[in-house]
Amino acid sequence: MENEICELLSIDYPIFQGGMAWIADASLAGAVSEAGGLGIIGAGNAPREKIAEEIKKIRAITDRPFGVNIMLLSPFVEEIIDLVLSEKVPVVTTGAGNPSKYMKSFKAAGIKVIPVVPSVALAKRMQKIGADAVIAEGMEAGGHIGKLTTMVLVPQIADAVQIPVIAAGGIGDGRGMAASFLLGAQGVQMGTRFLLAEECTVHPAYKEKIKNARDIDTTITSQHFGHPVRGLKNQLTQSYDRLEREELQKAAPDPSVLENLGIGALRRAVVDGDVVNGAVMAGQIAGLVAEEAPARAIIQEIMEESRTVFAKGASEW
């Protein structure tokens, strides 16, 4: 597929795999990149040594472009920045902060920078500081989310900036991809869909939780304390809801109570398979597809379905 984002990044298909912390490792990212999309290693809160190992692994899997997602609030952010610069990682996506202070260094190293943004104002700011594109992520996404839905966020950002826009949040198949293009996007990012890639190394219990999810099975925790997170309902989300209600009734609420509850929760679900007391982060498309498949097959299916949708629409219009 020829479009601006494919030409910019030298990829075959404008499909990004989300840089999910604890989940998006070299195995998954390498498979996506090798299949023609953009695989992204999720740095999360991992130290330099761990991400250096994943970069070495992905380069053994594929010689195609790949990215690293940098969470700018990570305690190891400076180490990770230095690593991607020294390794000349082709693409960096950023979240949980403003990459302004690192932009000159990224550019000097020839790295393409694509921040995740939840609003028009931040998209404009990223364009101004030299971002190559932006990922407009709606609140349908899993993990940390903003306030706007993909349907309303993408067209507003597409109208506000001149750089390419990648749509994210609630996109899990070719229909969602086609809709995103009609809204003004030039690519899509999918996280939850790739949880069911055969190359995704999350615990089998995590995958089963995704497979068995219904349309109403995600929930948002910590909505009143500035760090809303979407995931599948379980005992942990119930505890979050209870503690949040208790804190809101106090004259001086203490957000740290909720923060402490979340320590190690994602790892418990992803690595240990504790989908009862762990954080099963997933977007609202969880359950839309209940079968595992190789990353290459997922990408091909999405592309074929999107082309079918466009062809059908063109004939009916």
Image (cartoon, grey):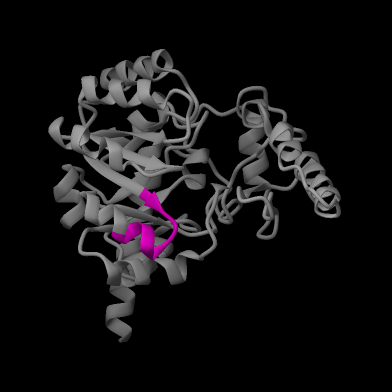
Image vertical order of residue 145 relative to residue 270, above or below: below
* Residue 311 drawn above or below residue 126: below
Q: Would you say 7 lies left or right of 216 here?
A: left
State the residue in front, 91 or 24: 91
Quarter of the image for the C terminus: give it: bottom left
Quadrant housing the N terminus: bottom left
Q: Where in the figure is residue 163, as x and y percent of width and height? A: 21, 59
Q: Residue farthest to the bottom?
A: 317
- Tell me the residue at 67%/29% (across/down): 263
At horizontal 67% and vertical 54% (from top left) the residue drawn is 223
Residue at point 29%, 46% (across, down): 114
Left or right: 115, with 275 as reference point: left
The reply, left or right, for residue 74 in relation to residue 92 is right
Q: Nearer the viewer, residue 47 or 203?
A: 47
Q: Which residues are magenta?
A: 116-124
Examine the structure image and report whether residue 120 is included in the region drawn in magenta.
yes
Give percent across and percent down for residue 284.
Answer: 59, 56
Where is residue 257? Give x, y as percent.
76, 37
Quick check: is 6 in the magenta stretch?
no
Q: Is residue 1 visible?
A: no
Give the number of callouts. 0
Q: Compared to 283, does 305 lie above or below?
A: below
Above or below residue 252? Residue 294 is: above
Q: Quick one: 302 or 29, which is closer to the camera?
A: 29
Q: Residue 63: image x %, image y %? A: 20, 26
Residue 10, can we see it?
Answer: yes
